[in-house]
Amino acid sequence: MKKAAAFFFLAASFLYAQAEPDGGGQLSSGPITSVEVSGLKRTKPRITDYALEKFIGREGETLDLNEVKAAVIDTGVLEPVSVELVRGEEGLILTVQVEEKWSLFPIPIATITSGGANFGLLLMDTNAGGLKDQAAVGGMYGSDGWMAMLMYRNTPDRRGFPGWNAAFFYNRRNQGNQSRWGETLRSYEAVLLSGRLGLDYPLTDHLNLSFNLSLTDLAITKRLFNAPESGYRTIGFAPGLSLRYSNWDGYLLSERSLSFAYGYKLALEGSSGHEFQIRGNYGVSLVPGFLLKLRGGGVLRPGGDALSESALYQGILPANFYALNYAAVQGGLEKYLFKFRMGTLSATASWQFVLSSSLLSGLNFDHGPAGGIRFYLSRLAIPALDFGAAYNMVTGIPQFSLNLGMGF
C-alpha cells in the first residue's frame, strides 16, 4: 500500500510538472490535441487509443466528461476513475485514469425460471491477450439437458481492421415447447451440434457491419409428444447492420441502438428458410441515476416449420414458449439505488407487450408488468446479476427468473 501511495504521489508530481490542471473558463478553451491514459496493466494501450481517439480535435469547452466515461465503460474491461482536461504546451490534454476489471476467472452461470433451472461453469477471459478479446470454455446442466461450449471473440481495436468470432456448441436437450399457460404442446429429445464463424467490421464509431457463417446439425433421438418428423442439417448465412450510441449519467449507462439482420439457412437435410430480424433500444437519463428505457424487436420467418421456432425470452411468458414470428415492445424505468465497491444496484419496472404466432398455438397477444433488481458488477468484466418477476395480464400467470450470466 505504501509503495502504491508513493507511486501515485510521484505520478501526480510528474503530471503537475508537465501539464497544468484545467480549472475551467479560459483554460478549457481550444481543441483537445492528445489523450493520456494511466492505470493500464494488462490491457494494451491501443484499446484505449481506439476508444478515445474520437475526442481528439473536440473543443474543450463543449466536451461532456460523462461521454468520455461512457467510452471507457463501453470497452467492457475498464472502469473510469477520473477524467479531466489539462493544459499542455501544444494544447489541451484529455487525461483519463482507469482501473482494469478482473477478466480472467472461473464463473458460475445460472438461469432459474418458473419452468426450470440450469447451472454451469465457464472458464473465461474477457480481456484475452490484453486486447479485449473474449474467450470461454465450459458447460451447463439443467432440467432440460446439458450443453458444452467453446467460444472466442476478437473485437476490432484498430481503424480499418475487422474483428472475428468463432464458437462451437454441443447440446443434448429435452425440448418441451409450452403454451402461454404452461401446458406442454410438443416434447422430444434431440442432439444439437453447431459451429459458427463471423466477422465484425466497424464502418464508423457507431455503425457496425457483421457477417456470420454457421453449420448446424440437429438430430431427434426420441419422440415423446407431437414431435417433428425429422431433424435438419443446414448452412447458415447471416449479414447484419447495427447502430449503437451509449451515454453515462454518472450512475447508469444508457444505450440507443438499432440493428437489422437477415438470415438464410440452406438445408442439406430438412427445409431451407429465411429469417428477418430487427432490434432496438432507447435509453435516456431523465435525471442522473434515473433512466427511461424503451426496447423492441421482432422476428419474421416466412414459411418456417416447427424446428424454425425459437424461445422469446420475454418475462411475461414461460421460458419454453416458442414462436415462429413475433414482435415485442417494452417500456419502463430503471432507478439507481446504491453503489458499492463491487458494483451498482438498481431497480427496474416496465410493461411488456408481445404479439406472437406459433404453429401450435396460433396468433396471441400478451401484456403485463415486469420488475426486478439488477446488480452491475463493476470489478468483474461480466454483465449483471438480476432477479425479475412478471405477471401476464391475459393468462393471469406470474413468472420469475434469476440470472447470472454473460453476454457474448
Image (cartoon, rainbow, N blue to C red):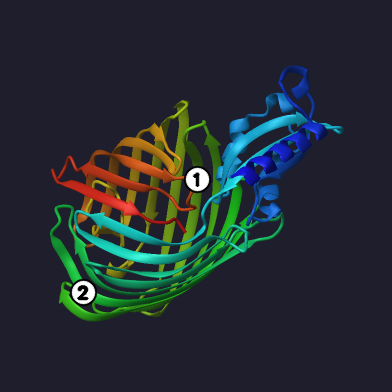
Q: Which residue is mark 1?
A: 258
Q: Which residue is mark 2?
A: 188
Identity of the residue furthest to the top in this view: 25
User: Which amino acid lies under the numbered mark 1 shown in the image of this protein?
Assistant: Leu
Residue 310 percent across, percent down from the top left: 32, 61
Q: For label 1, count other residues whose C-alpha is less than 10 Å away and answer few (under 14), some (14-19) or many (20+).
A: some
Please give left or right for residue 18 compared with residue 80 in the image: right
Residue at left 65%, top 61%?
A: 162
Residue at left 32%, top 56%?
A: 325
Residue 338 percent across, percent down from the top left: 39, 33
Residue 16 percent across, percent down from the top left: 77, 32
- Image quarter (top left, top right, bottom left or bottom right) of the N terminus: top right
Residue 108 percent across, percent down from the top left: 36, 61
Please give left or right for residue 347 compared with residue 22 in the image: left
Q: Nearer the viewer, residue 285 or 216?
A: 285
Please give left or right for residue 219 compared with residue 194 in the image: left
Residue at left 15%, top 76%?
A: 224
Q: Nearer the viewer, residue 382 or 182?
A: 382
Identity of the residue furthest to the front in this view: 2
Residue at left 23%, top 68%?
A: 144
Give the number of the disc on residue 208.
none
Judged from the image, the secondary structure of the residue bearing numbered disc 2 is strand
Residue 311 position by quadrant? bottom left
Q: For label 2, count other residues whose C-alpha is less than 10 Å away and answer few (under 14), some (14-19) or many (20+).
A: some
Marks 1/2 in contact by CB < 8 Å: the verdict is no
User: Which amino acid lies under the numbered mark 2 shown in the image of this protein?
Assistant: Tyr
Q: Is residue 84 above or below residue 148?
A: above
Judged from the image, the secondary structure of the residue bearing numbered disc 1 is strand
Compute the Cα span from label 1 to label 2.
Answer: 36 Å
Q: Is residue 201 above or below residue 149?
A: above
